[in-house]
Each structure stands twice: as structure tokens, then as C-alpha cells.
Image (cartoon, rainbow, N blue to C red):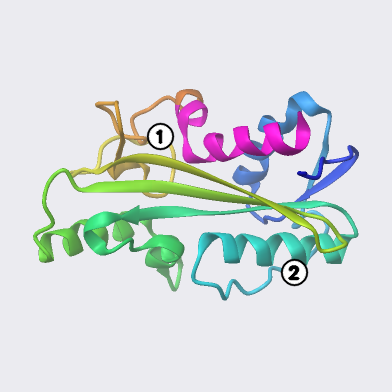
């Protein structure tokens, strides 16, 4: 039996303002008092696992124990079939530079590596999102969302963030980077995971 969220305050285990806003909007219908780990001054734990669920669990349990409140964490990224599932949990790491994240560099690397291995077309890929809702007593519930699609080149669109300009979702002829934000949020991997979370713990 899945544990339900009992109401009240929920910590979102992130220091990212954009992610907090996105998650707050998705939970708005449930009158949840959402606060971020950043707003509570919590540290960011090291993400030492090599799976999305492993890293999401680290973040959720760390925030739940440190705050004494239920905590929600997500770990997400892009897996490219022609690269054996890379960059996967290293999606953001591919963009790291000494002066901050450069996702144009990360997208260029992704395409360059696909060219190097002469990956066949369509160059299928998936955006993946794993949500973990953890309680201070150590219990958790896990929900996974997937958006299948393909990597395209050149980059298209200036909406969204991260790898969105090179990801064309299945069934569409535009990239996430060209798609209206609300349309993307309706069909995305995060939306898929959230539907499952809501059905399991909030409905």
C-alpha cells in the first residue's frame, strides 16, 4: 500500500529556483505548502550513485532527515541510445565549466560523439525523470517518467533549458526548445512522473 502525503509542508530538495517554481505549480491543486531545501539553508548532499533513482533517493532522504519534513527530490537527464545511455546521470556534468554550466557545449559534445560512432538515424533518446518522496522515518515512494524522442541537429529553439534544443519528442516535429513551455510541461518526462506521484500519494 502506497503511503499518502498527509498534507502540510513539503520540502523540495533543490537549490534551483526554476525547478522549485515548476514543482510548486504542479502541486498547487493540493494546497501543499512547498519550501525548497535552499530556502531552509540545507546543504546539498554529494550525488554519488550512478542511477537516477539512487541520486534522487540521496537528495530526498537527506532533506527529509535534515528538515524533519517529507521531502521530494527529482533526478533527471537525457539518455542517448547511440551513446550507450550516456550522458544519463552525468547530463549536467557534461555542461560544467569553471565559470558555470554551458549547455551549448554539452549539446555539441553529444552530437560530436554520435557522429564519432556513426550512430544510425533516427538517433533515439529519452528524457527521464525519477521522483522520490521521502519521509523523516526513512520510508520512500519512487515514480519514474519517460519522454521518448530523438536527438536532432542543428539546435532549434530558445525555449526551455538544458538539452531541449536538440531533443525532438516522439510524435512531434518540433524540439522541446521550440515548444511552448506549457505544452512541454504537459507532455514531459517530469509531467509523466508527476502524474504517477499525484495518483499514488496525493489523490
Question: Is 102 displayed left or right of 197 in the figure?
Answer: left
Instruction: Count residues near mark 1 (Cα–Cα under 10 Å), then give few for <14, some for 14-19, many for 20+.
Output: some
Q: Is residue 200 above or below residue 72?
A: above
Location of residue 86 in the rendering, given as x and y in whole percent from the top left corner: 33, 63
One can see residue 108 in this view: no
Q: Tag on residue 43? A: 2
Q: Is residue 45 above or below residue 114?
A: below
Say which residue appears at 56% left-offset and 51% top-offset: 130
Q: Identify the image quadrant of residue 114.
A: bottom left
Q: Is residue 24 above or below residue 81?
A: above
Q: Nearer the viewer, residue 52 or 153?
A: 52
Q: Quadrant of the N terminus?
A: top right
Location of residue 154 in the rendering, given as x and y in whole percent from the top left corner: 18, 44
Between discs 2 and 1, the one toward the N terminus: 2
Please identify the dominant SS of the magenta region.
helix
Examine the structure image and report whether residue 192 is included in the region drawn in magenta.
yes
Location of residue 34 in the rendering, given as x and y in whole percent from the top left corner: 80, 41
Instruction: Count residues near mark 2 (Cα–Cα under 10 Å), then give few for <14, some for 14-19, many for 20+.
Output: some
Q: CA distance from mark 2 to mark 1?
A: 30 Å
SS at badge 2: loop
Question: Is 201 displayed left or right of 186 in the figure?
Answer: right
The residue labelled by disc 1 is: 159
The region drawn magenta spans: 184-203
Location of residue 187 in the rendering, given as x and y in whole percent from the top left corner: 46, 29
Amino acid at each position: 500500500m502506497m503511503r499518502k502525503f498527509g498534507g502540510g509542508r513539503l520540502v523540495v530538495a533543490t537549490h534551483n529556483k526554476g525547478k522549485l517554481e515548476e514543482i510548486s505549480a504542479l502541486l498547487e491543486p493540493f494546497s501543499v505548502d512547498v519550501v525548497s531545501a535552499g530556502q531552509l539553508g540545507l546543504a546539498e548532499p554529494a550525488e554519488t550513485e550512478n542511477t537516477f533513482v539512487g541520486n534522487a533517493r540521496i537528495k530526498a532522504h537527506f532533506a527529509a532527515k535534515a528538515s524533519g519534513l517529507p521531502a521530494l527530490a527529482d533526478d533527471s537527464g537525457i539518455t542517448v541510445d547511440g551513446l550507450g545511455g550516456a550522458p544519463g546521470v552525468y547530463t549536467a556534468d557534461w555542461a560544467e565549466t569553471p565559470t558555470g554550466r554551458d549547455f551549448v557545449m554539452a549539446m555539441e559534445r553529444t552530437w560530436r560523439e554520435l557522429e564519432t560512432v556513426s550512430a544510425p538515424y533516427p538517433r533515439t533518446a529519452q528524457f527521464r525523470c525519477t521522483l522520490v518522496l521521502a519521509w523523516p522515518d526513512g520510508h520512500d515512494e519512487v515514480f519514474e517518467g519517460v519522454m521518448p524522442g530523438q536527438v536532432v541537429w542543428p539546435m532549434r529553439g530558445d525555449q526551455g533549458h538544458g538539452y531541449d534544443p536538440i531533443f525532438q519528442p516522439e510524435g512531434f516535429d518540433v524540439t522541446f526548445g521550440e515548444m511552448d513551455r506549457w505544452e512541454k510541461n504537459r507532455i514531459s518526462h517530469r509531467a509523466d512522473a508527476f502524474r504517477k506521484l499525484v495518483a499514488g500519494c496525493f489523490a
